[in-house]
Image (cartoon, grey):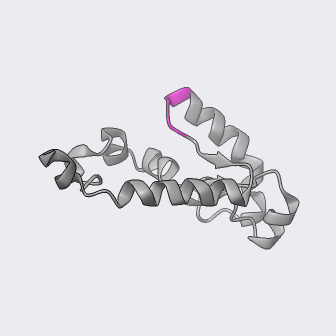
Amino acid sequence: SSLSQSKRDPRLVESWAAAQVETSNNFASQSLFWHVLSNGLNHQIEHHLFPGLNHGHLHLISPVVRATCQEFGVTYKSYDTWRDLMEATLTWFDKLSVDDTLIAKN
C-alpha cells in the first residue's frame, strides 16, 4: 500500500504537529460564507492543531500557522474554493486507487 509505514515521510511519523498539518486541508479560508456555513471548520489545519480553540478564532491564528509551516518546511494545503478542494480530493482518490503491487510487477 502507498500508505505503508515504511514509505511514509518520517516527519509525519515522528511529529504529531507535522502530521496534523500535512494530512489536513483548508478551503475557502477567505470566505465569510464558508466560515459561517462550516462553522469555522474551513480551517481544518488549525482545528486539528488546536481542537480546543473556539472555531470562530481559527482564522486569526491561520497566518501564524502558515508562516511556521513555511519556516519548518511543512506543507500547508489551503484551497481557494470548495471546488478546488474537491478536485484535489478526487485526484488523491485516484492515487489511492492504484495497486502498488501491480506497478512493482511491471
Left or right, 82 with reference to 34? left
Q: Nearer the viewer, residue 81 or 44?
A: 81
x 86%, y 65%: residue? 33
Q: Position of residue 90 (x, y in %)?
A: 52, 60
The quarter of the rendered structure image containing the N terminus is bottom left
x 78%, y 63%: residue? 56
Report the label total.
0
Q: Position of residue 80 (x, y in %)?
A: 74, 49
Q: Nearer the viewer, residue 51 or 88?
A: 88
x 48%, y 47%: residue? 22
* Residue lying furthest front: 106
Relative height, residue 10 to residue 34 (above, below): above
x 37%, y 58%: residue? 96
* Residue lying furthest left: 105
The quarter of the rendered structure image containing the C terminus is top left
Q: Quadrant of residue 67?
A: top right
- Say if the magenta span includes residue 80: no
Q: Nearer the viewer, residue 97 or 37?
A: 97
* Residue lying furthest top: 71
Q: Position of residue 93 (x, y in %)?
A: 45, 60
Left or right, 57 with reference to 75? right
Q: Nearer the viewer, residue 40 or 56?
A: 40
Q: Position of residue 68 (x, y in %)?
A: 59, 34
Main SS, magenta region, reads: loop
Q: Which residues are magenta?
A: 71-75
